[in-house]
Image (cartoon, grey):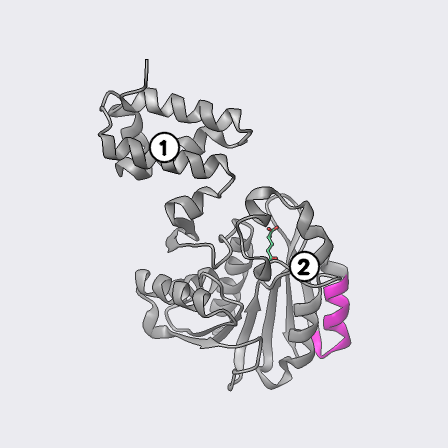
């Protein structure tokens, strides 16, 4: 008997994804069906005898097919949540990671404590960092830079969606190429995966997310080196440089910072206990 109501389609979807070795099959099937029906998670259970229309069934089947092929759920439903805010996402930008919230929380605390006024986000991607900082720090002006025109388009949309468009300047720039002023804070979650590690990433990452947002060159440090060695014209004295880093990069990025005019170099761990954020003050 083919599925007809919510309860039956949900269990059908979970089975299909489980058979395709999708580890998060249960929550994924729920999110896909919630999106098709515009239901909350509660409604999935309180309205479980609702019979899907032909249209809804077709859309759900398409979604399941994409997920079976390892497309990340966030790209399928074209949205994701970050710092309690809603973002649009598409394959031209990385999907914002929970770990990056550690970086943004660090930045927000520091901006408030030091009364910083200006922030430059290098490689803004979906705008997750720039938009969250603008949203939670209403006295701050943010510049969001990215080399990708498509990413900037997505980031602008996300700024509008969260009502901070008027406090963010977007510039197309390869790192500092088109940056013209100095900032109190420079923040970046640059590509930091070593080139030859990319092939070992999960299929849903390496086959769908933009490699240009992940690949940090042979040693994974390409962007840290570029930013650290060129930032003197763009960072105010006593300003802060904040990076997301890979779990094994704290030592090397600290060394790069200490060779330049940086002090108070500090590493912060993520919820898994891995080094994730490095902060430093420019002297
Ligand atoms: N944390 C991301 C991942 O492991 C990488 C992000 C980045 O390179 N900036 O997929």
**Residue 200: assigned label:** none
Is disc 2 surrounded by few (<14), some (14 to 19) or many (20+) residues within 10 Å?
many
Give the image quadrant in which the ligand numbered 1 is located: bottom right
Is residue 258 part of the magenta span, yes or no? Answer: yes
Q: 240 or 5: nearer the eye?
A: 5
Q: Residue at x 47, y 54 (%)?
A: 91
Which residue occupies 77% across, 60% down? 251
Mark 1: few/some/many CA within 10 Å (<14, 14-19, 20+): some
Residue 194 in sight from this viewpoint: no
Query: Circle 1 — which element?
Result: helix
Residue beneath the point at 56% across and 48% down: 207
In which image quadrant can residue 218 be found? bottom right
Q: In the depicted view, which residue is nearer to us: 253 or 3?
A: 3
Q: Nearer the viewer, mark 2 or mark 1?
A: 1
Q: Earlier in the sequence, mark 2 or mark 1?
A: 1
The verdict on residue 251 being magenta is no
Q: Which residues are magenta?
A: 252-262
Circles 2 and 1, Cβ within 8 Å, touching? The answer is no
The residue beneath circle 1 is 61
As drawn, 221 above or below 102: below
| Residue, disc 2 | 267
Residue 124 in sight: yes
């Amino acid at each position: 008997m083919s599925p007809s109501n919510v309860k039956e389609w949900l269990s059908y979807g979970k089975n299909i994804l489980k058979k395709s070795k999708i580890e998060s099959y249960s929550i994924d099937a729920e999110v896909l069906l919630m999106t098709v029906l515009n239901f909350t998670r509660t409604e999935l259970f309180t309205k479980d005898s609702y019979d899907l229309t032909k249209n809804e069934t077709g859309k759900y089947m398409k979604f399941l097919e994409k997920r079976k092929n390892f497309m990340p759920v966030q790209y399928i439903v074209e949205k994701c949540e970050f710092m309690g805010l809603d973002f649009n996402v598409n394959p031209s930008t990385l999907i914002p990671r929970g770990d990056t919230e550690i970086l943004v929380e660090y930045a927000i605390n520091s901006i408030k404590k030091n009364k910083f006024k200006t922030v430059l986000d290098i490689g803004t991607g979906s705008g997750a960092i720039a938009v969250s900082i603008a949203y939670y720090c209403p006295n701050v002006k943010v510049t969001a830079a990215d080399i990708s025109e498509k990413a900037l388009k997505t980031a602008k949309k996300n700024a509008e969606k969260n009502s901070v468009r008027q406090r963010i300047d977007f510039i197309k720039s390869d790192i500092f190429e088109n940056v013209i002023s100095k900032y109190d804070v420079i923040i970046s979650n640059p590509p930091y995966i070593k080139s030859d590690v990319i092939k070992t990433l999960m299929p849903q990452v390496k086959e769908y997310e933009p490699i240009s947002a992940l690949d940090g060159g042979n040693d994974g440090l390409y962007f840290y080196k570029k930013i650290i060695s060129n930032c003197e014209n763009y960072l105010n004295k006593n300003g802060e440089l904040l990076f997301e880093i890979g779990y094994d990069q704290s030592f090397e990025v600290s060394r790069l910072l200490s060779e330049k005019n940086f002090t108070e170099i500090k590493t912060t761990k993520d919820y898994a206990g891995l080094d994730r954020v490095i902060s430093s003050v420019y002297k």
